[in-house]
Image (cartoon, rainbow, N blue to C red):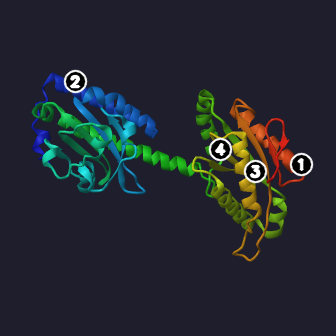
Amino acid sequence: MWNEEDFLEVPMADPGQVERLLTCIEFSKALLSAYDMETLLTAVLERIKALIPADNWSLLLVDHKTQELYFAVAVGVDPESLKGIRLKMGEGVAGSVARTAEPVFIPDVDQDPRFSARADSATGFNTRSIIAFPLLVRGEVIGVFEVVNVEDEKYFREKYLPLLTILADYVAIAVDNVYNLQKLQARTFIDEVTGFYNPRYLACKLDHLLPLVLEKKEFFSVVFMDLDDFKHVVDTHGHLLGSQILGEVARVIHAVLRPDDSLVRYGGDEFIILLPQTSQEEALAVVRAMRRAINSTPFLQKEGINLRVTASYGIATLPQDAQDREELLRIADRAMFRSKGRGKDGIMVGRDLTPAALD
């Protein structure tokens, strides 16, 4: 730990120091103009190399759910080797800084019991010294900024320590801005009736994913699903219970899906399921499981109604059925309507509208 004097007694007339301050200001502009975490971390990555003379530096963020620290960015080591490492509050130097919200300078980690060698073991790096700053927003630690193995401690403290203090504040503000934007975006992407995604999410997700899928020549399947005779259900039980059924159906579908799949309520009683890296045959297996789950579930059980419902399904897969978003959705939608026209409770597949075996 150091005192406030470490930051104040710095000769600011040094032309080199002025240049570094200007660089820091440009850095802050880049950080505060980032609107997603990937863009933010890329901005940090590109500019920090030129700004800070050290063997290694890391940016760790707090996982809000687990309250553990994870490596968001690392320079000087292979970042892939750090992906599985999580530090609890109080564990290692970063965990200690996160718990106390106080910066530390450790000139020799071998002499400090707070140091944890887990990252060194995973990467093969040899840590000698660490400077660590908490990233603070409204008094809460949201991450830790570390600089490892500075070459000249005295020179570093005189020339770069004040810049790092400023930089840590800007990084904290930028990360918090991205978190807040993510929360706002999440609310705009959620359907109020089911609690799952809405059409806004669908458009953004497909615009982001499909160019990558086409570039990598991967499969991507889309399922259109429409409940059969749902108007009769609403006419019989009313709109409130109709909305409750939609929520229950959505939860049944979601229980069948895999972690990377997405469930969208498209409108009314129609749902769209996005299945990344999924061939048409694999998508058909998912839809069959979905159909079995819906057909075997009694809905409105708490109301003593025990209603049974069925649905009609259409599947389209990129690249074999389409090459863009509009065509992919159109084919899946057309397949679903053909399924409904053939007697409902069925599955139609692809551009050729092939009826699928149900079991």
How busy is the neighbourhood of tag 2: few (under 14 within 10 Å), some, or many (20 plus)? Answer: few
Q: Which residue is mark 2?
A: 19
> Can residue 193 be seen here?
no
- Mark 3 residue element: strand
Earlier-in-chain disc, 1 versus 3: 3
Q: Is residue 104 left or right of residue 253?
A: left
**Residue at 43% across, 43% down:** 178
Residue 320 vs 102, above or below: the answer is: above
Q: Residue furthest top?
A: 15
Residue 318 vs 310, above or below: the answer is: above
Relative image position of residue 119 (x, y in whole percent):
30, 43
**Residue at 15% across, 45% down:** 110
The amino acid marked with disc number 4 is Leu
Earlier-in-chain disc, 2 versus 1: 2
Q: Are marks 2 and 4 in contact (CB under 8 Å)?
A: no
Q: Which residue is mark 4?
A: 275
**Residue at 74% across, 69% down:** 298
Separation of residues labelled 4 and 1 (CA atoms):
25 Å
Relative image position of residue 326 (x, y in whole percent):
72, 34
Earlier-in-chain disc, 4 versus 1: 4
Q: Which residue is mark 1?
A: 341
Earlier-in-chain disc, 3 versus 4: 3
Q: Which residue is mark 3?
A: 225
Q: Nearer the viewer, mark 3 or mark 2?
A: 3
Residue 348: quadrant of the picture: top right
The amino acid marked with disc number 1 is Gly
- Mark 1 residue element: helix
Q: Nearer the viewer, mark 3 or mark 4?
A: 4
- Mark 4 residue element: strand
Earlier-in-chain disc, 3 versus 2: 2
